[in-house]
Amino acid sequence: MTARRPIVTLVCLALAALIAVGVAELPHGSSAGGPSATRLTATRTRALLAGSPPALAALHAQGGTLIEGGASALHARLASLKGYPVVINKWASWCEPCREELGAFQRVAAEYGRRVAFVGIDSEDPSRTNARAFLKSLPVSYPSYYDESGALGEQLTDGHFTPATVFVPPRGKPYIREGEYPSAAKLARDVQRYALNG
């Protein structure tokens, strides 16, 4: 029995060391799998989006910007994306769940951005300054359209709820999801299911 004690002690010490290393590797200030765990560097984002078709590359060139022009500007952009699956995310700078899901949108938009168009709608946000600060906090590879009144966002998402995401397949009916995306994995599954295979 006494011969086993040193082995058990060594195993326990090894497990404790592995756990300590794992904890040290977690992103600071967030839980594993949380929003900041999904952050991508600008270099990695560019690498993922390299070779995008022209209509999608034009979106990436405006990544992280707030675009004026309301409904007419957005409808012109959507017309230029005909034939591509589109994911539209309605958000606002005052919306905490929007902030929480931004990391998931940053990652998934970069991973799918060569096949799927991502677009943001900044809906019912009284301050362009706050909206731009929100976009700067975690840059995404697509632009957002400013919708101060909220009418455009309500029309697109068929409701007042924020955040909300609309998946528009090239053929078939759009799918609207209300609420925050808790992870990049969940968002990626819905992109695959409702935008690419819808």
Image (spheres, grey):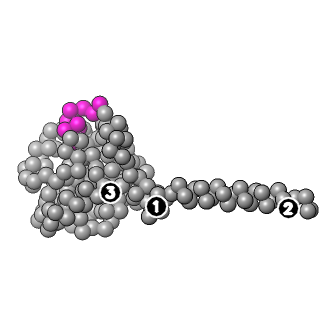
108 or 136: which is nearer to us? 136
- Amino acid type, label 3: Leu
The image position of residue 40, as x and y in percent, is 37, 48
Can residue 154 be seen at all in this image of the molecule? Answer: no
Q: Which mark is residue 143?
A: none
Q: Is residue 54 left or right of residue 75?
A: right
Residue that numbered label 2 is attached to: 5
Q: Measuring 27% from the left and 67% from the top, which residue is drawn there?
A: 95
The numbered disc on residue 28 is 1
Q: Is residue 26 magenta?
A: no
The answer to whether the residue labelled 3 contacts the one labelled 1, judged by CB atoms less than 8 Å apart, is no
User: What's the distance in space between the residues labelled 2 and 1, CA to CA?
Assistant: 36 Å
107 in relation to 83, above or below? below
Q: Which residues are magenta?
A: 51-59
Horizontal arrangement in the rendering, residue 25 relative to residue 90 (left or right): right
**Disc 2 from disc 3: Cα separation:** 49 Å
Q: Measured along the vertical axis of the image, is residue 169 above or below residue 13? A: above
On the question of residue 37 being in view, the answer is: yes
Residue at x-position 34% and y-position 41%:
43
Q: How many marks?
A: 3
Q: Nearer the viewer, residue 113 or 11?
A: 11
Per the picture, the main secondary structure of the magenta-coloured stretch is helix
Q: At numbered mark 2, what does the secondary structure look like: helix, strand or loop?
A: helix
Q: Which residue is mark 3?
A: 102
Q: Amino acid at mark 2?
A: Arg
**Foreground: 58 or 42?**
42
